[in-house]
Image (cartoon, rainbow, N blue to C red):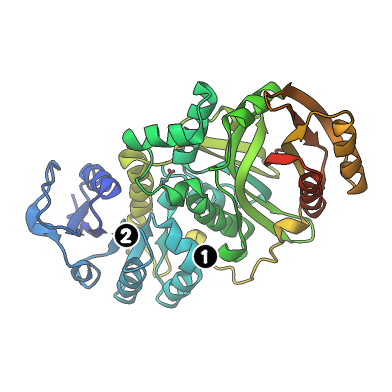
Amino acid sequence: MENKKKIKVGLIGLGTVGSGVFKTLKNFDDIEVTKIAVRNINKKRDIDGLDNSIVTDDAYSVVNDPEIDIVAELIGGLEPAFDLIVTAIKNGKHIVTANKELLAKRGQELFKISEQYNKVILYEAAIAGGIPIIMPVKTILAGNKINHIEAIVNGTTNYILTKMDVQGASYEDVLKEAQQLGYAEADPTGDVEGFDAAYKIATLASITFQKRIDINKVYREGITKIRANDMEAANDLGYKIKLIASANMYDNGDIDVRVHPMLVSKKSTLAHIDYVTNAVMLKGHPVGSITLSGPGAGEFPTASSVVGDILAVAAELGKSEYILPMMRCKHSEDANMIDIADTTNKYYISINAKNNKGVIGKIGTICADNDISLESIVQRCVSDDNTANITVITELVKEKNMQRAIKLFEQDGNKVNSLIRVQV
Ligand code: HSE
């Protein structure tokens, strides 16, 4: 048999994902991990088959190594990841990364440099961990016009919301428990405030709609204000509450990308995606509606995507000068992104009103004055302090009108507990 040259891979990062990638790549005879950069070289690592002589704490020795063909960046964050990737590209290496923050914030610069140097950057692992979504959108779904994405792309928040739903517990209690079990980080901000999901949907929308998405224009709202009572009310009304990352392209080309909690109909697939599982639902023509679900994080699921990308590059190396044309990012048009204030949504509103005669009538009048049509209005209970808890579901209304009505409800002496958008 011909003695084929092994493809040499350098890893930057040997944490959860890096270890999974190293262990998985051991199964491939024609791929060799020749250098691994770590932050702390003295840390004890119990990884089968790891030769410590290839481990370094100098990440630049990986990206500057002339022998390495592919660099997998698995450390996350903006710097030094950005500079390491740029250096690697300039040194002739193809890149595989799991870094969603970097792609969302500086992807444009990176893709420009990779084109200049005729190198590819693949990032299947950056969006929904083990779920294949980037490669399918760029290849087998390329014949579609996809105009709608709805997704659960953050496992931490989905775990918290599922537990709140199942246990009837408060956000604070479930967060504490999730932190103790290692499902949520000590500083959970990136997950619970929706940053992580926003990075992922921004990148996914950009490749799906083939327009540049400005991460600063992605509307973002986390799950910290969701109350156990909202979960209960949603259930009674036939919904589950999920943190949904969505992207829409309207007929005029305008694009709406956002992350916020949403009441999702129990009849929809996303309502049944629980705990740390992720799912991405796409609607397009001619395919119709499809949902891919699976593990959105973790050592081996994420390694599956990183290794898939490494193998895709490895399979092409040496065949032609311009490899993986389908996987390249060639769009250069900025998306015209619409502000949340200009969108139209259905809403769930929970109001505590003084238990006087005519309170429901007053709420109805404010809605009518602001062009808000109601689907349902229910007085759920009267509390000990003689306030009535009223739950409203609207029909489709303008966000601006809704926000104006909320102010008026409050000026009228009511307490607005929650305003959550409802899946349409
Ligand atoms: N922190 C993310 C989540 C996993 O909770 O889903 C990595 O993207």
Q: How many marks?
A: 2
Find numbered disc 2 in the image and state the secondary structure of the residue it sits on. strand
Say which element carries label 1: loop
Query: Compared with residue 28, is residue 175 higher up or lower down, i.e. above or below?
Result: above
Say which amino acid is labelled 1: Cys
Residue at coordinates 38% horizontally, 54% vertically from top-left?
A: 98
Mark 1 vs mark 2, foreground winner is 2
Residue 194's x, y, as percent? 52, 50
267 relative position to 189: left or right: right
Q: Is 156 or 291 nearer to us in this picture? A: 156
Where residue 292 sits, quadrant-wise, is top right
Which quarter of the rendered image does ligand 1 occupy?
top left
Quick one: which residue is furthest to the front in this view? 385
Q: Which residue is mark 2?
A: 73
Q: Which residue is mark 1?
A: 329
For marks 1 and 2, the one nearer the N-term is 2
Q: Name the one closer to the observer, 362 or 371.
A: 362
Q: Is residue 273 visible?
A: yes
Cα–Cα gap, marks 1 and 2 = 18 Å
Q: Residue at x 44, y 78 (%)?
A: 116
Q: Give, as a three-letter code, the residue at label 2.
A: Glu
> Which label was assigned to residue 235?
none
Q: Is residue 149 above or below residue 317?
A: above
Q: Residues within 10 Å of mark 2 (few under 14, many from 20)?
A: many
